[in-house]
Image (spheres, grey):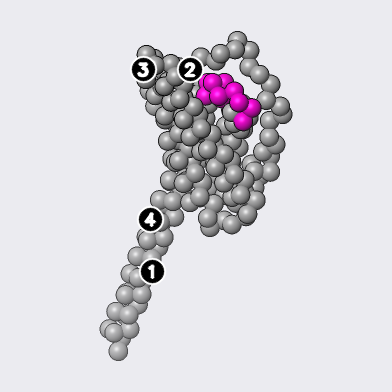
Amino acid sequence: MSTTDETRVDGDLEDLAQAVADQVASFLLAVREVAHRGETATTVPLLLLEVSQLLLAGARLGVMTDLVPQEPYEEETGPDPDLDRVREGLAGLLGAADEYVEVFDPFVDPPELVPGRISDDVAAIAERLAHGLAHHRAGRVAEALWWWQFSYVSSWGAEASAVLRALQSVVAHDRFDQDKHETIELERIAAAEKLDDDSS
């Protein structure tokens, strides 16, 4: 991003901040709705969609030059939102699919496998995003962008990526395991019909 036109750069940052704020607000609203609605069948697809869209916003922050906050100390944003109900709601909806295992760092040899929970990670991501959104809504755009970028690189980017892979795995197992069971059932039916034909 060029720095020759300070007004244009500020405008670009304003646009980026608003786009990220809109995506964050959408994510927070959707996650609460999914957790409180209690519809097991739609939990994984909706989370997969929301996390995918969120990671696009995070990638835009990640490829930017490091943002530097204008003030040396972070302004208070008030109490963090209570996300225990979201965490508990998602855990109940996901059941056994909540727990997964992730490679902590693919560049470490040997790779370290760490356990995780989708419900815990989604709640943690939501908490960090909400913190930045509070800055943005208070008019501290640079502070919001700095926080979102810093927390993306240091925490929620990796957490969201791990959650996305886990959710994709749940979808794949549900789809392919079902196809496998249907194939086996069809083979059993065909074998039974053949036995009936041979015996008649």
Tell me the SS state at disc 4: helix
Task: Give the alpha-carbon distance from disc 3 to disc 4, as whole Å.
Answer: 48 Å
In the picture as drawn, the residue positioned furthest to the right comes out as 79
In the picture as drawn, the residue positioned furthest to the bottom comes out as 200
Q: Which amino acid does label 1 sit on?
A: Glu
Q: What residue type is labelled 2?
A: Leu
Who comes first in sequence, dot 3 or dot 2?
A: 3
* Residue 61 image-quadrant placement: top left
Residue 98 against residue 128 in the figure, above or below? below
The residue depicted at 68 percent of the width and 39 percent of the height is: 84
Rendered image: mark on residue 185: 1
- Rendering coords of residue 133 (x, y %): 59, 31
The residue depicted at 46 percent of the width and 29 percent of the height is: 16
User: Label 2: few (<14), some or many (≥20) within 10 Å?
Assistant: some
Q: Is label 3 or label 2 in front?
A: 3
Tell me the SS state at disc 2: loop
Q: Which amino acid does label 4 sit on?
A: Phe
Q: Between residue 162 and residue 52, name the one nearer to us.
A: 52
- Rendering coords of residue 15 (x, y %): 46, 30
Check if residue 120 falls in the magenta segment.
Answer: no
Who comes first in sequence, dot 3 or dot 1?
A: 3
Q: Between residue 76 and residue 17, name the one nearer to us.
A: 17
Task: Give the alpha-carbon distance from disc 2 to disc 4, as whole Å.
Answer: 44 Å
According to the picture, the residue beneath numbered tag 3 turns out to be 2
